[in-house]
């Protein structure tokens, strides 16, 4: 255990200053671009993950699979501008 006590504010302030130095500034400004650059992919080759649409699917389990139920289930889906859908 260190002899001096460091406050969280001092610790995180020092961490932020070191992250802003050099390539860390790029990582904070454009994390997807920094990640792509680190593995040798061009930023333009990445899909556009901007959210275009949010969908909610309502499933009636009483009519699906022969299971009798009076409750409904909901499935949320997010669709990106690139057409990627995640449920």
Image (spheres, grey):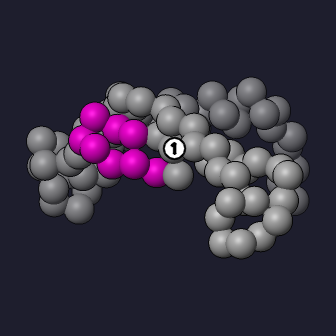
Q: Residue furthest bottom?
A: 66
Q: How many marks?
A: 1
Position of the N terminus by quadrant: bottom right
From the viewer's perspective, tell me whether residue 48 is left or right of residue 75. left
Q: Is residue 24 above or below residue 1?
A: above
At 24% across and 52% down in the image, what residue appears? Answer: 36
- Residue under circle 1? 77
Query: Where does the magenta region start and end?
Result: 79-86
Q: Is residue 82 magenta-colored? A: yes
Residue 72 rendering spot, x and y as whole percentages: 76, 48
Is residue 72 something that shows in the picture? yes
From the viewer's perspective, tell me whether residue 12 is left or right of residue 72. left
Residue 23 rendering spot, x and y as whole percentages: 30, 41
Is residue 34 something that shows in the picture? no
Q: Is residue 11 magenta-colored? A: no
Residue 13 rendering spot, x and y as whole percentages: 63, 28
Q: Is residue 51 above or below residue 79?
A: above
At 54% across and 32% down in the image, what residue appears? Answer: 16
At 28% across and 34% down in the image, what residue appears? Answer: 81
SS at circle 1: strand
Q: Quadrant of residue 2?
A: bottom right
Question: For mark 1, does the 10 Å Cα neighbourhood hold few (<14), some (14 to 19), or many (20 or more) residues?
Answer: few
Q: Is residue 68 above or below residue 53?
A: below
Residue 22 rendering spot, x and y as whole percentages: 31, 37
Residue 46 vs residue 37, the one in the foreground: 46
At 82% across and 32% down in the image, what residue appears? Answer: 7
Residue 30 vs residue 13, the one in the foreground: 30
């Amino acid at each position: 255990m260190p002899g001096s006590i460091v406050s969280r504010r001092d610790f995180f302030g020092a961490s932020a200053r070191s992250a802003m130095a050099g390539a860390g500034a790029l990582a904070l400004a454009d994390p997807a671009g920094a990640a792509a650059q680190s593995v040798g992919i061009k930023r333009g080759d990445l899909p556009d993950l901007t959210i275009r649409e949010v969908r909610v699917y309502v499933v009636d389990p009483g009519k699906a699979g022969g299971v009798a139920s009076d409750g409904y289930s909901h499935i949320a889906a997010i669709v990106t501008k690139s057409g990627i859908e995640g449920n």
